[in-house]
Image (cartoon, rainbow, N blue to C red):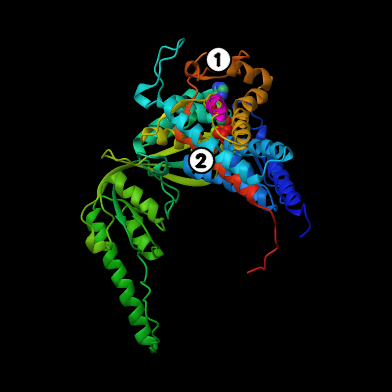
């Protein structure tokens, strides 16, 4: 290999990674712009969400892919902060190039970056507050709430008009479900965001086999099987004459009718039966004659949601039915699809966030905003600490890391300083995307931090900088910590590559 090849590889890798970062940089912060993504089939997505943009990009360069992975890790761990992690990685790479130009070895840069990241995170933990103990800001009467966390995550995601209602809805949904992963979301195009609500119960997106008006209270049975001929596990061949075949068919028909009769016995005044598998038409017709509506072929998750909502177990077959439950059912049609909204008498933890929006495109973006907000609320509700947002924590970490740099020996000191400079890219970019001068913002923040204020960030309404607690712009600490960790990790991994070799396909 020629002398200098490894350097060329490194520089082109850095360039490729930075190109990817630049595609999302202008989306950072509440005034970040949106991207319109389009595939060859003409399908479009309009989004401001870093992880979504990166996921949809057609990237072939390996280091570009590493940046995308970094944003995915951030999303998987903390739901939000994907653009932050990506932009930080881009800046760390840019600054590492300057260090390489000055003659630093990539390994020295990596060591300095790792040391600086540990210092930054240690300091971050010191400036974080527990949820019950956040500082009351100067101009704000109320303490910080979970709604503020939700609002910070969702600002800029096409929901500005009803942001307070949206934030409340997010908190209610997570409080009801216990964690973000358990919150079910249903997007129904039509109406506006302010028509969104939390439905306490299960939503079934299958229709009745026979069309009927069913709105109201019903006796309900859940059946975790089908009302059709059972398939046997064994592969048996049986030869029957015509009479034998007719008898065989009749006996299975009789058997199914017997099962249907059992259902009728449990629902003497009619009702609804929700069935996991299929139900033969003549069985459905028999039930219908007895005033029983059938909804069949339901997914396992829907059966579980119905069971929790109604407070009854789904029977494994009709002879196991213990009792019917009483529930309210509303049948609604949205865009040619019928949904049954089922609520029970018992107060269960089942709930679904029903999101409404004018178009499918805006609704998709709203759903992504909700995903982020539900996630961060869930983190804090489950014990994560809180820090001020707007990039203030990054500016504060930069100050500390810079002041500690001098205690490091040798050239890694320069890498530690470069790391501190890189951290400032977050408030700088938020300010820049808001139409302000990034340099002025950084200088003003440094001045404030020197005076002991670690919670100032860009004031996007009135220019300059302001206290983030006053605005209620706050975020979970683990989001910031993960962004620093992922960005450091991906940067040092890229810096360690000195050669790229084509490998044999599998
Ligand atoms: P990410 O994908 O990293 O979450 P976003 O585009 O969602 O990127 O922007 C998040 C950043 O915007 C966070 O640093 C957050 O604190 C900041 N932010 C949110 N609301 C405000 C606000 N009102 N003023 C200043 N910064 C804000
Ligand atoms: Mg965000």
Q: Position of residue 321 (x, y in %)?
A: 23, 58
Q: In the rendered structure, does residue 384 fall within the stretch colored magenta?
A: no
Image mark for residue 111: none
Q: In the rendered structure, does residue 400 fall within the stretch colored magenta?
A: yes
Considering depth in this image, is 143 or 184 the residue closer to the camera?
A: 143
Number of numbered labels in the structure image: 2
Which quadrant is home to the N terminus? Answer: bottom right
Q: Residues within 10 Å of mark 2 (few under 14, many from 20)?
A: some
Residue under the point 51% across and 30% down: 153
Seen from this angle, which residue lies furthest left? 322
Q: Main secondary structure of the magenta part?
A: helix
**In the figure, residue 363 lies in which quadrant?**
top right
Which quadrant is home to the C terminus? Answer: bottom right
Q: Is residue 290 visible?
A: no
The span from disc 1 to disc 2 (Cα, nearest Å) is 44 Å
**In the figure, residue 294 lies in which quadrant?**
bottom left
Q: Mark 1 and 2 residues: CB-CB less than 8 Å, in contact?
A: no
Q: Is residue 284 visible?
A: yes
Considering depth in this image, is 459 or 421 the residue closer to the camera?
A: 421
Label 1 beta carbon less than 8 Å to ligand 1: no
Give left or right: position of 4 versus 253: right
Q: Residues within 10 Å of mark 1 (few under 14, many from 20)?
A: some
Ligand 1 rendered quadrant: top right
| Sequence-first tag of 1 and 2 | 2
Local secondary structure at mark 1: helix
Seen from this angle, which residue lies furthest top? 139
Residue under the point 39% across and 33% down: 384
**Residue named by callout 1:** 448
For marks 1 and 2, give the one nearer the viewer. Answer: 1
Magenta region: 397-406
Label 2 beta carbon less than 8 Å to ligand 2: no
């Amino acid at each position: 290999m020629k002398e200098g090849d490894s350097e060329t590889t490194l520089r082109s890798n850095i360039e490729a990674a930075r190109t990817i970062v630049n595609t999302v940089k202008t989306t950072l912060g509440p005034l970040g712009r949106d991207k319109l993504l389009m595939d060859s089939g003409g399908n479009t997505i309009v989004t401001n969400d870093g992880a979504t943009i990166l996921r949809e990009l057609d990237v072939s360069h390996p280091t570009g892919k590493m940046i995308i992975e970094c944003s995915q890790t951030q999303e998987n761990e903390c739901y939000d902060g994907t653009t932050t992690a990506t932009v930080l990685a881009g800046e760390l790479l840019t600054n590492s190039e300057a260090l390489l130009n000055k003659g630093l070895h990539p390994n020295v840069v990596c060591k300095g970056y790792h040391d600086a990241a540990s210092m930054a995170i240690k300091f971050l933990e010191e400036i974080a507050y527990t949820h019950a103990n956040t500082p009351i800001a100067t101009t704000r009467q109320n303490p910080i709430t979970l709604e503020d966390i939700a609002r910070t995550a969702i600002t800029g995601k096409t929901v500005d008009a009803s942001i307070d209602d949206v934030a409340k809805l997010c908190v209610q949904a997570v409080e009801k479900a216990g964690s973000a992963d358990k919150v079910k979301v249903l997007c129904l195009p039509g109406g506006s965001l302010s028509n969104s609500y939390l439905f306490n119960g299960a939503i079934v997106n299958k229709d009745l086999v026979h069309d009927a008006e069913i709105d109201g209270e019903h006796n309900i049975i859940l059946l975790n099987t089908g009302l059709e001929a059972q398939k046997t596990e064994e592969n048996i061949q049986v030869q029957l004459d015509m009479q034998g075949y007719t008898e065989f068919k009749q006996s299975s028909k009789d058997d199914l009718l017997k099962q249907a009769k059992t259902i009728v016995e449990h629902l003497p005044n009619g009702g609804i039966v929700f069935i996991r598998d299929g139900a033969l038409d003549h069985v459905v017709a028999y039930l219908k004659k007895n005033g029983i509506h059938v909804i069949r072929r339901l997914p396992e998750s829907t059966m579980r949601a119905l069971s929790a909502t109604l407070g009854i177990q789904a029977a494994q077959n009709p002879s196991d039915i213990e009792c019917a439950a009483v529930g309210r059912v509303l049948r609604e049609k949205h865009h040619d699809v019928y949904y049954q909204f089922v609520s029970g008498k018992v107060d269960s933890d089942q709930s679904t966030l029903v999101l409404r929006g004018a178009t499918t495109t805006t609704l998709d973006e709203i759903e992504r905003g909700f995903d982020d907000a539900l996630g961060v609320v869930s983190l804090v509700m489950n014990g994560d600490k809180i820090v001020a947002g707007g990039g203030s924590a990054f500016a504060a970490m930069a100050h500390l890391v810079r002041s500690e740099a001098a205690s490091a020996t040798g050239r890694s000191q320069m890498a530690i300083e470069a790391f501190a400079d890189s951290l400032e890219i977050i408030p700088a970019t938020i300010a820049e995307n808001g139409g302000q001068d990034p340099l002025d913002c950084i200088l003003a923040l440094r001045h404030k931090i020197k005076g002991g204020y670690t919670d100032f960030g860009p004031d996007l309404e009135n220019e300059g900088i302001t206290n983030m607690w006053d605005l209620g712009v706050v975020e979970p600490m683990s989001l910031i910590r993960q962004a620093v960790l992922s960005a450091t990790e991906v940067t040092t991994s890229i810096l360690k590559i000195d050669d790229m070799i084509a490998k044999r396909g599998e």
